[in-house]
Image: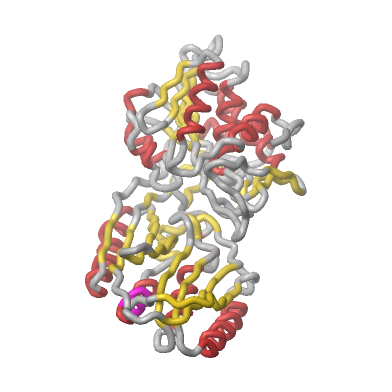
């Protein structure tokens, strides 16, 4: 890959982002990027730790005159959500991300960009590879943030002396994040039973949806391909049988595509239903997902479909799982609780349905949503597995690092920043649990459509946020 980003300012941030983009780093597959970060630190003669979970900690001594300043942690995550458009020949385990510049924004080509959180990682590396004035630094780059924050969850907090945390995983310039939601996982398993007669197979696909982040985009009423497919299948329950169902690829991404293989004696009925649903969806999603469409393909083969009660349980489950915004604050414009039906798979034994609920109020998940889903599984006679709750980050009434950030922003850009809480998950809550007294803030450049192949980031905004980060560090004495 050539130097696509050569000449962009700030040079070191974009240089390191391009280097990161050459390295496979899907969640759960971070060995190569973890080794790269560790070796980078060693090449700069910096203290580095790579723990057994592949988290990387890099420590840099304070500049002259900053020896008595509180230690600052710069933090981001090395993994990325790996999504690509249908039919694209891209192997995330091997191929570099193909970067391109368009109208002042940085994009990937047909895949997610990985600016979430590669830009934050690149900023931290640029600070480490500089002669800026700053207090002692502890740079923490975690693993597996996108799937379950397991890197941060398994971190040894005793390795740190930091008093301030600057998380670099936010996506709006001029907005300081000072609180976020926690979350969990709720998974269902439907045991399969198969008919003993082969029937003609057809594939129904829902595609063309815009997708997005299951936290920051959940309030935008975007279409969920899994839910839409469930509605279509329910319409066919008396006219077809189900062979398999697949949808989505990440629990924290709103699914853009889903498909089911069905069998039927009368293909005319299938085409009739597909045509009807194309009209319905065109009207329902004309604002949020104007390109949504349903297709039907004759597979020209025969398969053994599942028994009818499995079809009925599957459609009932998909229909009854609530998705989107479940509750909002009555005081501010903030989602409190939500759920994303992110992934459906079929293997030799089960249809599996994976959900990622979020909430800034823990009991809304642990004492409301989760018990409701367990009861739903019991009624349907299927299995339910629940993940542990990762903590949110409660807004602090007083915060020294927040005050420093606000003042620096005002002085640099001559305008007032916004301080807010978000519904997406950040690792700050976990880190604050592990490091007593840690005072946190999160910031980042203008970035859009995270977790989708349309992900892009403003080049100018990256420069602004890096300038702000350097100024903040300079002021911590």
What is the quadrant of residue 386 in the picture?
A: bottom left
Which region is colored magenta?
310-314
Residue at the image point whose x is 65% and y is 45% from the top: 457
Along the line of sight, the residue nearer the viewer: 411 or 448: 448
Q: Where in the figure is residue 398, as x and y percent of width and height?
A: 43, 36
Q: Is residue 417 visible?
A: no
Residue at the image point whose x is 52% and y is 87% from the top: 267
Residue 460 to residue 252: above or below: above
Residue 79 to residue 436: above or below: below
Residue 311: in magenta span: yes
Along the line of sight, the residue nearer the viewer: 453 or 299: 299
Residue 398: in magenta span: no
Q: Where in the figure is residue 141, as x and y percent of width and height?
A: 47, 32
Residue 353 to residue 44: above or below: below
Residue at the image point whose x is 53% and y is 65% from the top: 257
Instruction: Name the quarter where the N terminus is drawn.
Output: top right
Along the line of sight, the residue nearer the viewer: 268 or 172: 268
Q: Is residue 357 visible?
A: yes
């Amino acid at each position: 890959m050539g130097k696509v980003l050569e000449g962009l300012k700030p040079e070191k941030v974009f240089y390191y982002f391009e280097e990161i983009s050459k390295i496979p780093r899907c969640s759960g597959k971070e060995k190569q990027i973890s080794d790269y970060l560790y070796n980078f630190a060693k090449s700069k003669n910096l203290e580095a730790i790579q723990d057994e979970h592949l988290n990387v900690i890099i420590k840099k001594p304070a500049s002259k005159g900053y020896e008595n300043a509180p230690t600052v942690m710069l933090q981001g995550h090395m993994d990325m959500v790996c999504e690509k458009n249908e039919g694209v020949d891209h192997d995330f385990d091997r191929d570099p991300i193909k970067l391109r510049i368009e109208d002042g924004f940085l994009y990937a080509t047909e895949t997610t960009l990985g600016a979430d959180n590669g830009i934050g990682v690149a900023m931290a590396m640029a600070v480490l590879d500089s002669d800026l004035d700053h207090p002692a630094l502890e740079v923490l780059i975690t693993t597996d943030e996108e799937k379950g924050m397991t890197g941060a969850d398994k971190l040894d907090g005793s390795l740190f002396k930091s008093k301030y945390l600057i998380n670099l995983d936010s996506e709006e310039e001029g907005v300081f994040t000072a609180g976020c939601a926690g979350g969990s996982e709720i998974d269902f398993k439907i045991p399969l039973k198969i008919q003993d007669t082969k029937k003609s197979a057809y594939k129904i696909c829902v595609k063309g949806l815009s997708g997005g982040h299951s936290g920051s985009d959940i309030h935008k009423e975007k279409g969920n391909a899994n839910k839409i497919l469930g509605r279509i299948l329910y319409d066919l329950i008396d006219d077809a049988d189900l062979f398999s169902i697949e949808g989505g690829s990440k629990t924290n991404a709103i699914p853009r595509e889903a498909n089911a293989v069905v069998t039927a004696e009368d293909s005319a009925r299938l085409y009739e239903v597909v045509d009807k649903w194309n009209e319905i969806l065109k009207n329902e999603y004309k604002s949020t997902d104007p390109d949504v469409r349903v297709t039907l393909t004759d597979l020209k083969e025969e398969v053994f479909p599942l028994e009818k009660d499995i079809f009925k349980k599957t459609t009932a489950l998909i229909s009854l799982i609530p998705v989107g915004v479940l509750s909002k604050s009555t005081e501010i414009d903030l989602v409190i609780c939500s759920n994303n039906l992110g992934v459906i798979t079929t293997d030799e034994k089960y249809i599996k349905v994976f959900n990622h609920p979020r909430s800034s109020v823990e009991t809304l998940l642990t004492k409301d949503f989760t018990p409701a889903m367990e009861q739903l599984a019991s009624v349907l006679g299927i299995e339910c597995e629940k993940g542990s709750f990762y903590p949110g980050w409660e807004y602090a009434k007083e915060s020294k690092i927040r005050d420093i950030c606000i003042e620096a922003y005002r002085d640099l850009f001559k305008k007032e920043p916004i301080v807010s809480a978000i519904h997406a998950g950040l690792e700050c809550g976990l880190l604050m649990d592990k490091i007593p007294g840690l005072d946190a803030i999160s910031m980042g450049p203008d970035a859009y459509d995270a977790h989708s192949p349309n992900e892009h980031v403003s080049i100018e905004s990256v420069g602004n946020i890096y300038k702000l980060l350097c100024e903040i560090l300079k002021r911590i004495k």
